[in-house]
Image (spheres, grey):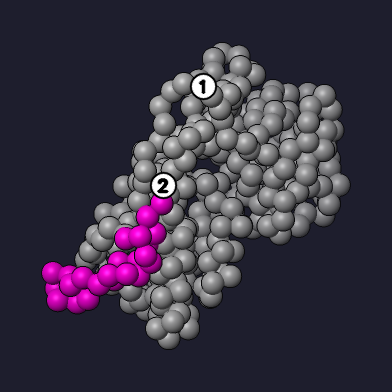
């Protein structure tokens, strides 16, 4: 398979939002790794898919369209599960769009829930820069981590699963801070599968700035147990605390284990763990050091009916067998979940 070129206005997904416009888009047939800027094509014999554009709007990829996205991992009992092969994506092979932000990989399983982005695409090659280097989103990530710590309090929101109200809890914390007179609050969606629509929600409710893992060079924070995840989290929080702000709201999104939230939470010390109640910002409790801590959150339940049931595919094939189960398929159902809020003032545990 030979390389090629694409027009400068070729469609690109939101995972590449930090990659600047390219006057000439050239790709070559080499294996694509996590975070590489890669060219894909939606086959003409399939249905359109819907992904998120860098502007945040829903963008349709039509059959026959070429577009730019990136290889990555995703692990979710509610949505799709997929990974990047050890040797990378192979030019000419078929893979799957695992998230609406444009994360592409081998499909392992997916749920019965409707996902407009899920579709089989052909990998064309990796996009190269002016000097012939393979472009990767890490090249365009935030790099200034050495600023002064403004000692802002950190509000950390965790959850027992995806879709249990973590963003709702985070927005409730943000609203409460704004009502108390805080004019500059930073929001960080530290884990999970990012999207512009989600961080924009924090901005809609008054966050001065909002960041996610794409800003720090990762298409997602999966798979579980990745070695550098603690260092990445430290850099994320260091950068956000170096910005002039009165508070930092950190949401650990996604499934808590697979998105590496447990590996990140202990890095914030001097925190009080508070279980959220049905009403946001309902209660106040006293911390061990005598300072007052606030519990802000939203108790939410997974969908007990029509919940996802995963079917695992044969890795030796092109994963066309990883089809979703009908909604009446018997199998495990998710349990109710909770969003949990932490608040602390110390930055990072040394």
Compare marks 1 and 2 and give the one earlier in the sequence.
Answer: 2
Circles 1 and 2: CB distance less than 8 Å? no
**Label 2 crowd (10 A; few <14 / some 14-19 / many >=20):** some
Q: Residue at x 63, y 38 (%)?
A: 115
Above-or-below relation of 284 to 195: below
Callout 1 secondary element? loop
In the image, which disc is placed on residue 109? none
Callout 2 secondary element? loop
- The answer to whether 279 appears left or right of 318 in the picture is left
Q: How many marks?
A: 2
Residue 175 screen position, x and y as percent: 46, 74
**Label 1 crowd (10 A; few <14 / some 14-19 / many >=20):** few
The image quadrant of residue 226 is top left
Q: Residue at x 37, y 65 (%)?
A: 279
User: Is residue 292 within the magenta segment?
Assistant: yes
Question: Which contiguous range is marked in magenta?
Answer: 277-301
Q: Which residue is mark 1?
A: 329
Any part of residue 345 in sight: yes
Magenta stretch, overall SS: loop
Residue 152 screen position, x and y as percent: 35, 76
Q: Nearer the viewer, residue 84 or 4?
A: 84
In the image, which disc is placed on residue 301? 2
């Amino acid at each position: 398979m030979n390389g090629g070129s694409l027009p400068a206005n070729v469609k690109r997904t939101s995972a590449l939002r930090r990659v600047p416009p390219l006057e000439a888009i050239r790709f070559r047939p080499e294996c694509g790794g996590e975070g590489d800027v890669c060219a894909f094509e939606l086959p003409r014999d399939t249905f359109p898919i819907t992904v998120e554009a860098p502007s945040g709007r829903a963008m349709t990829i039509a059959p026959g369209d070429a577009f730019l996205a990136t290889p990555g991992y995703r692990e979710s009992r509610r949505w799709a599960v997929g990974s990047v092969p050890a040797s990378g994506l192979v030019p000419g092979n078929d893979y799957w769009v695992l998230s609406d932000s444009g994360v592409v990989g081998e499909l392992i399983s997916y749920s019965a829930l409707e996902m407009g982005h899920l579709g089989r695409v052909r990998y064309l090659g990796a996009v190269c820069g002016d000097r012939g280097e393979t472009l990767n989103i890490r090249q365009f990530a935030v790099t200034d981590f050495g600023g002064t710590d403004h000692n802002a309090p950190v509000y950390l929101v965790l959850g027992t699963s995806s879709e249990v109200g973590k963003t709702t809890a985070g927005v409730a914390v943000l609203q409460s801070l704004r009502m108390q007179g805080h004019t500059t609050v930073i929001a960080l969606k530290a884990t999970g599968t990012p999207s512009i629509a989600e961080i924009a929600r924090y901005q809609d409710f008054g966050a001065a700035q909002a960041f996610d893992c794409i800003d720090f060079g990762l298409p997602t924070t999966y798979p579980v147990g990745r070695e550098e995840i603690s260092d990445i989290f430290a850099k994320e929080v260091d950068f956000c605390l170096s910005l002039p702000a009165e508070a930092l709201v950190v949401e650990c999104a996604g499934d808590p284990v697979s998105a590496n939230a447990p590996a990140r939470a202990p890095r914030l010390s001097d925190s009080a763990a508070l279980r959220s109640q049905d009403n946001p910002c309902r209660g106040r409790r006293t911390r061990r050091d005598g300072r007052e801590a606030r519990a802000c959150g939203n108790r939410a339940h997974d969908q007990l009916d029509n919940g996802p049931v995963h079917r695992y595919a044969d890795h030796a094939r092109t994963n066309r067998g990883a089809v979703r189960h009908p909604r009446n398929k018997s199998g495990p159902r998710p349990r109710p979940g909770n969003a949990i809020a932490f608040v602390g003032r110390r930055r990072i545990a040394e």
